[in-house]
Image: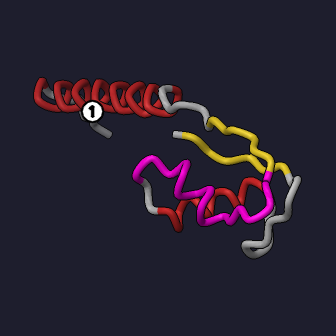
Amino acid sequence: MKRRRLNKRGKLFLLLLLVTLVITINVSAFCNFSQKPDEYVIIKINPGDTLWDIAKYYSNGQDIRKVIYEINKINNLEGSNIYPNQLIKVPIN
């Protein structure tokens, strides 16, 4: 059985494929490490405070509904009920 060898074009293709693969892996690894860790502020709920008001204050131009969702998720809240003197984490970006 005759063995088949790669010609120059095949070797070049494999080299370019390998270089592309290495660059892709390095770029994706760099992107994952360059993300900022989540930052939070802990606030104490006062009488009359609502999640909507808190989210609006800390939203920094984001959709308030998304901020409320994040607050609920971070604090394991069910619904939008909060109570005076309760401490909650609020994401700051």
Left or right: 70 with respect to 34?
A: right
Q: Nearer the viewer, residue 6 or 11?
A: 11
Q: Is residue 89 above or below residue 48?
A: above
User: Residue at 75% across / 75% down in the picture?
Assistant: 79
Residue 88 image point, x, y percent: 78, 50
Q: Amino acid at mark 1?
A: Leu
Helix, strand or loop status at disc 1: helix
Point out the residue furthest to the right here. Answer: 85
List x then y, in percent, for residue 29: 48, 29
Instruction: Determine crowd level at label 1: few under 14, some 14-19, many 20+ residues with C-alpha closer than 10 A.
Output: few
In the figure, is residue 22 to the left or right of 65?
left
Q: Quadrant of the N terminus?
A: top left
Residue drawn where x is 67% and y is 57% of the image: 71
Query: Which residue has dot 1 on it?
Result: 17
The residue segment tinted magenta is 45-61
* 32, 9: nearer the viewer: 32
Q: Decide whether residue 51 is among the magenta residues.
A: yes
